[in-house]
Amino acid sequence: MRIRFYTVLITCTILSYSALAQERAVTQTHETQAAITPAQALQILKDGNKRFCSEKMLHRSFPEQVKETAKHQYPFAAVVSCMDSRTSSELVFDQGIGDIFSIRVAGNVINKDVLGSLEYAAKVTGVKLIMVIGHTQCGAIKGACDGVKLGNLTELLEKIKPAIDAVPQTVQPRTSKNHEFVEDVAKANVELSIKEITEQSPLLKELADQHKIALVGAMYDISTGQVTFYEH
């Protein structure tokens, strides 16, 4: 009986380790990056968000990934997101070191610095997906809706004004106190940011037209952790 018990115990242990091995994340290499299509890159982020929401995130050894990416990096996506402390792209998409470029700025606005970074990510490093992701209850969006003036932030918030104008005038009141208005502006801001990328970067537009990269918008819900994707 004792031998049988140990046999069962060992078998269960092996199965447990096998399950863990299947759930272990793989650090991106030149080969894995090259094999990923733009559509697959998007699906990887979708699957990652599902794992994040269900608390089934992949096992990673960050010290190991540090060593594995010390000489080279092969990220498959670049994500432009807000600087909000609750919206880390690596976490909400369950990604590790070397998986994605994370470009963060208040209101996930687009400027020349962001465009240059995205051009480097796509043309030099070889990412397959560029995503602009906003989030609910965004402080920058609220500030723009209320016409906040505060040092250099004033100029940044001006970049959100076109999104405010894009929301129908029938949505009233047009201040941060109106939750529906704020979320409509946040969504419009993401969509206009995607448009700005293609209009202001011929390089990225060409790559998108050639289907070498995909451009996708998204919205993160800070209350649920879920991401809604805007695909065109």
Image: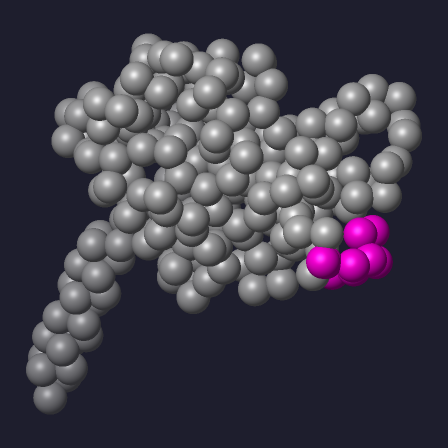
In which quarter of the view is residue 143 placed? Answer: top right
The image position of residue 129, as x and y in percent, is: 34, 32
**Would you say residue 165 sits in the magenta stretch?**
no
In which quarter of the view is residue 63 placed? Answer: top left
Establish if 99 lies above or below 25.
Answer: above
Which quadrant of the figure contains the N terminus? bottom left
Establish if 19 lies above or below 175.
Answer: below
Predominant secondary structure, magenta span: loop
The image position of residue 169, as x and y in percent, is: 72, 52
Extent of the magenta region: 170-179
The image position of residue 76, as x and y in percent, is: 31, 30
Res. 143 in view: yes
Which quadrant of the figure contains the C terminus? top left
Q: Nearer the viewer, residue 141 or 63?
A: 141
Q: Nearer the viewer, residue 59 or 2?
A: 59
User: Could you tell me which residue is drawn at 20 percent across and 54 percent down?
Assistant: 22
User: Could you tell me which residue is drawn at 66 percent across and 51 percent down?
Assistant: 168
The image position of residue 208, as x and y in percent, is: 30, 25
**Would you say residue 174 sits in the magenta stretch?**
yes
Establish if 188 lies above or below 192.
Answer: below
Left or right? Give the position of 4 relative to 194: left
User: Could you tell me which residue is drawn at 40 percent across and 39 percent down?
Assistant: 216
User: Could you tell me which residue is drawn at 62 percent across and 29 percent down?
Assistant: 109
Q: Nearer the viewer, residue 208 or 5?
A: 208
Left or right? Give the position of 62 relative to 213: right
Count of numbered circles in the view: 0
